[in-house]
Image (cartoon, coloured by chain):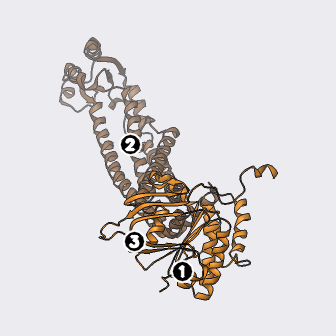
Amino acid sequence: MAGFRLRRPHSVERCDGPVIHFDNVTKTYPNQSRPALENVTIDVEKGEFVFLVGPSGSGKSTFLRLILKEEKPTDGKIHVAGKDLARLTNWKVPYLRRRIGCVFQDFRLLPNKNVYQNVAFALQVIGKPRRFIRKVVPEVVDLVGLEGKHERMPDELSGGEQQRVAMARAFVNRPMILLADEPTGNIDPATSIGIMKVLDRINRTGTTVVMATHDAAIVDSMRKRVIELEYGKVVRDQSRGVYGQAY
Amino acid sequence: MRAQFVFQEVWTGLRRNLTMTVALVVVVAISLSLLGTGLLFVKQVDNTRTYWQGRVQLSIYLCTATSVSPQCKANGPATETQRNSIYHDLTSLRSQGVEAVYYESQSRAFQRFKQDFAQDRSFSSLVTQNEIPDSFQVKLRNAETDYPVVAGAVQGRAGVDNIVNVESILSNFYKLLDGARNAVIVVAIILVIAAILLVANTIRLSAFNRRRETSIMRLVGASNFYVQLPFLLEGIIAGLFGWLLAAGLLIAVKTLGLDTLQQYFPYNVQLSLADLIEVIVLAMVIGVVLCGVTSFLTLRRYLRA
């Protein structure tokens, strides 16, 4: 079907300027005295790999939710993929989220669908045709290292494998950004390394990765950009950083 | 938008919620049937009214040899002169509301009597032609206002047995039908409210049961419409099943109920197939709109967009 290929090949989209731009952003949840994020200004360029570290309650999850527009900032501007989120209407938000993949600590797979169906679900709900799904899903499932396990149900998989399925689902639509909220939180250290390898592979295709984590060993071993939050404020922004201060 | 995927989700939703779906279908069916029955009643009454509109409103019965009223016993059966004089006076009242006057002879009346009571031979065979009075059938322009004038002119005259105000008999009958119709409609409205609440609850429960799927759908960037569509369709499809049941019940009401009553009336005021179809289609529209709108509004409230 040569004529079919007139569209852009399925790859990461182009965007000039930082893919994530936070400009003096403050977020205070109602009924809370201290802001979850305070005067945060961060730029993340395309293709970067960023670790977001800090103790519980330091604002890491809030940061990620603001990118998805699951929350709105109390103050400040947020630009994602060049678009000002404040000016994004409600019905356009789904289209923003299609360019962002998400991975969570609790995997969030559908328990009564197998590996293939879980990944395909992400494409089905945005209306992709079956032919497309049948071509793309196996590629991605193989990419995350689950060849031959297409028919397994989530409860037949280990924690590490389930997280790989989640990553396949997050990546299958070739998003611009991949957000990971403590992806290795429920996984043993040895398996975590495998997970990080997959994330690295994804990052190498050009996808920007922002990962919130407590896992000091991983942060130290990968030497990527580290942004440290404490009580909602950015206290450190270091390229090729480590988890804690080297005292 | 992939139809097959959507319908798969709808089917899953309906199955998981089976008890509530069945309850919903039943309530919709009953409420639509009652509404439809009320409408059928209305149509039936209208048909009857229309029939009588063109007929006489006033019957003046003349004395026969066997009449029992005092003036007839005193004066005997109506004579030819008396008849002519009554006829003359009635026609001269044209300006006061008389539209037409028909004379029905005893033989004609006897024929009609035998025809009307054809089902009850034991009764009709006891009566002879002499006992059936002849009459003047008067059609009035305006039944209510003209009746007293015309009746007053003929009341108590020699030869007149009694005057029957056909209209007042009918109006009692209409009151009865109207009362039945109103009762049916009140109950129908109560059930419609119950149906609305039940649809809202069923959709809410369905959305709650599928919150894992819907949260992932929203995370992955499914448009709001796509997320809500399966639930909307669930509500509408359940409503359509309810309507099918209601349609069946309405057909039964018409054929087994109203049409069999027809045999008690000598004139034909049976509802046509077109009437029945009209009521059934109206029921479908009401059912679908009710379920659709309620589902939509419930989703707006409980499925955070």
Q: Residue at x 37, y 23 (%)?
A: B105
Residue underneath mark 1: A242
- Identify residue type, mark 3: Gly
Q: Residue at x 53, y 61 (%)?
A: A20
- Identify residue type, mark 2: Phe
Q: Is residue A188 left or right of residue B155?
A: right
The answer to the question of whether label 2 and label 1 lie on touching residues, with beta carbons closer than 8 A, is: no
Is label 2 or label 3 in front?
3
Above or below, comparing residue B115 to residue A130 in the picture: above
Disc 1 to disc 3, how far (Cα)? 19 Å
Check the picture and name the quadrant holding the N terminus of chain B. bottom right
- Specify the quadrant of the image occupied by residue B121: top left
Q: Residues within 10 Å of mark 3 (few under 14, many from 20)?
A: many
Mark number displayed over residue B2: none
Shade of chain B as shown in the rendered figure: brown
Q: Residue at x 31, y 40 (%)?
A: B173
Label 1 sits on a secondary structure element that is: loop
- Identify residue type, mark 1: Val
Q: Is residue B234 left or right of residue B204?
A: right
Q: For the residues tagged 1 and 3, is the chain the same?
A: yes
Residue underneath mark 3: A232
Question: Between disc 1 and disc 3, whose residue precedes?
Answer: 3
Which chain letter matches label 3?
Answer: A
Q: Is residue B210 left or right of residue A35?
A: right
Residue underneath mark 2: B123
